[in-house]
Image (tube, rainbow, N blue to C red):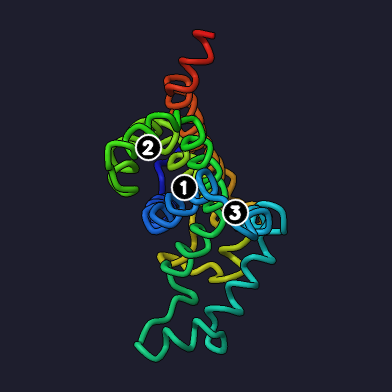
Amino acid sequence: MTGPTPAEWSALGLALRIASVAVIVALPFALALGLALSRGRFRGKALLEALLTLPLIVPPVVTGYALLELFGKHGVLGQALATIGISVTFRWTGAAIAAAVMAFPLLVLSIRTAFDSVDRRLEAAAESLGASAWHRFVSITLPLSMRGVLAGVVLGFARAFGEFGATISFVGSIPGQTRTLSIAIWELLNQPGGEESLQRLVWAAMAVALAASCLVGVLRGRSPAAEDARDA
């Protein structure tokens, strides 16, 4: 068996880069929304929760089509970006957007669960001592929920890394730009004589997924909420 080809390394490296950028971009919004859903009481909360899960329910190609309509050359956001010389269609940045959209629900739901596990009496005590909402968040809520937040980040990264349907619908398959590991695997399935390369890419995908799954298990297993449950 020969070693990995440059095209295989390119697909793997591109998938890792896109997943990393997707999570970094989505994380601030996921933290804000997770905190709002965990602590907030407002009209339309149930509707917001329903909309949040849409990318997990609808076929990924539908999400990809919606992104194409938004960011395409005739889309509202696409035209706005074009005025400042930015285009994301058929570029790796577009693939990162698709990955971020697909990973966002998992990221938010995990972060919300982590925030829910924090004892609110600690926040109330800090508030009674004059701590601002921001100070309570950075000094109490976020540190105590950090393991859960990190678990959400790992889950989001794994989902973004394995993204396929929305990406290929939105930005296609361009070597070095949008042909991620998942897309490369799909293309090899439809090509004769690519079994050896296909096996290497499948094993690489499984290795990343297994590492992410184990890391999430470690983070959640050592979370304060899990320790309290064991003590009980």
Most extreme residue toward the right is 58
Horizontal placement of 194 versus 47: left or right?
Answer: left
On residue 11, the disc is none
- Mark 1, residues whose alpha carbon is within 10 Å: few (<14), some, or many (≥20)? many
Q: Looking at this view, is 27 or 33 the one in front?
A: 33
Amino acid bearing label 1: Leu
Q: Dots 1 and 2: beta carbons under 8 Å?
A: yes
Give SS at disc 2.
helix
Instruction: Give how far across and how far down residue 93 sits, in percent.
Output: 41, 68
Q: Quadrant of the C terminus?
A: top right
Instruction: Give how far across and how far down residue 220 sits, in percent.
Output: 47, 25
On residue 141, the disc is 2
Separation of marks 1 and 3 at Cα, in angstroms:
42 Å
- The residue labelled by disc 1 is 35
Give SS at disc 1.
helix
Instruction: Give how far across and how far down residue 170 sits, in percent.
Output: 57, 71
Separation of marks 3 and 2 at Cα, in angstroms:
46 Å
Name which of mark 1 and mark 2 comes first in the sequence.
1
Q: Looking at this view, is 217 or 117 the one in front?
A: 117
- The residue labelled by disc 3 is 188
